Amino acid sequence: MNWAQQFDVFIWLDSNDYQQKYSSYDAILAVDVNKQITCDCKNAFSKLKTFQENIDDYIFGYLSYDLKNDLEDLSSNNLDGLGFPDLFFFQPKKLFLFKNDTLEILYIRDLENKIESDLEEIQSKKNLTIHSNNQNSFRIKQRISKKKYAKKLHAIQDHIHRGDIYEVNFCQEFYAENSIIHPLDVYQKLNRISTPPFATFLKIKDKYLLSASPERFVKKEGNKLISQPIKGTARRLSNKTEDRKLAEQLHKNPKERAENIMIVDLVRNDLSKSATNGSVKVEELCKVYSFKQVHQLISTVVSKVSLKTNPIDIIKSLFPMGSMTGAPKISAMEIIEEQEETKRGLYSGAVGYFSPNNDFDFNVVIRSVLHNKTNGYTSFIVGGAITSKSDIDNEYEECMIKAEAMKNALINTNI
């Protein structure tokens, strides 16, 4: 990671040794650009499809939430302080794949003679001390007050009572202007706080994603698709007995289960668009997974696809993910645009990669800090699923719990 900082573009994907039966690698580092695609939402999936078909190699990057506007008659007019492009993918010059005790190194042909010297340079930076957060400069502000949050939730529940939607994922932003942060320092602290299975450090010149995501959007493994939506959250406790009780309560909580099951139904419907007949299955329903900060209800939905189906077409049929929109999806996205005050951008989009054999794996961009070094804007967004049974104080508290990890990674110098 110290060595990679010298490159204008690189991505680090880390499973944190999380025992995921669908994990292909423990970690991946892809650095430097051979070819890339950057674009706004207009015809984005078509452009990505052409790029991916012509590369015939690993490509890494992200799909922002606002690619919804390429799929439906929608728009994104809320405040954007970060300025990330809607879509970015690159073919790396240098690729490191970590699995168990094996490191596989893949360089583009012209650079294969650089492997030994790069490994020596990496070794020399092993004990390099990174910047301390006491040199950071920022003041975190909240975009929506609690009073305003309550008013917006009442408006969302009015939509639910009228039958416009059943559930919507409503989010709010925390931000800092004219901030100075040291991205690797913040990422490592955030990762230590959460140790999630889909952690990401992405640098694109002056723009950074520092993510501790626990959620997989979708993975393709041969002819199998795996989606693992998260809905349902409970705080972790230091007392083991009480902590187990909270996990059991979460598993039995009718409201949390209802949220999860609604999204599972949406994911089943989305997967059916590309699935072979009768292949959509729910492998796990509302299973409790425990992370350092929170317990989560996670379901696993799978399907089979024809190997002739284009991977970009599969992603397009599923995007954006149901866990970050709501049901029905289009109505939920319209209400999100109406009630939220910040353009989501990369938040609640997806980061990951396509492999040369048309497999792919993408996370959901949540529990993440985003930073624009040039204008000094730092942002993190948190949210939750709103249903007819949502209690405003409980929903607000859930947002505050989710915000703690990002706040601590930015502020706490003793983690």
Image (spheres, rainbow, N blue to C red):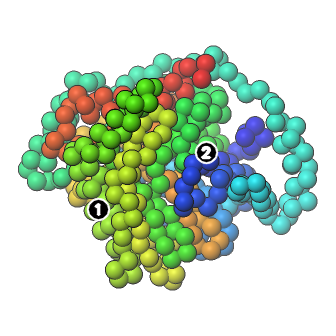
Q: Residue at x 33, y 41 (%)?
A: 248
Q: Residue at x 64, y 57 (%)?
A: 25
| Residue 70: x %, y % from top left | 38, 62
| Horizontal arrangement in the rendering, residue 239 relative to residue 6 (left or right) | left
Residue pushed farthest left? 162
Q: Amino acid at mark 2?
A: Asn
For residue 99, which numbered disc appears in the image? none
Q: Amino acid at mark 1?
A: Leu
Q: Quadrant of the N terminus?
A: top right
Occupied quadrant, residue 344: top left
Q: Quadrant of the C terminus?
A: top right
* Residue identifier under label 1: 266
The answer to whether residue 94 is seen in the rendering is no
| Horizontal arrangement in the rendering, residue 254 relative to residue 379 (left or right) | left
| Residue 313: x %, y % from top left | 45, 72
Q: Earlier in the sequence, mark 2 or mark 1?
A: 2
The answer to whether residue 219 is seen in the rendering is yes
Q: Residue at x 62, y 47 (%)?
A: 17
Nearer to us of marks 2 and 1 is 2
* Residue identifier under label 2: 16
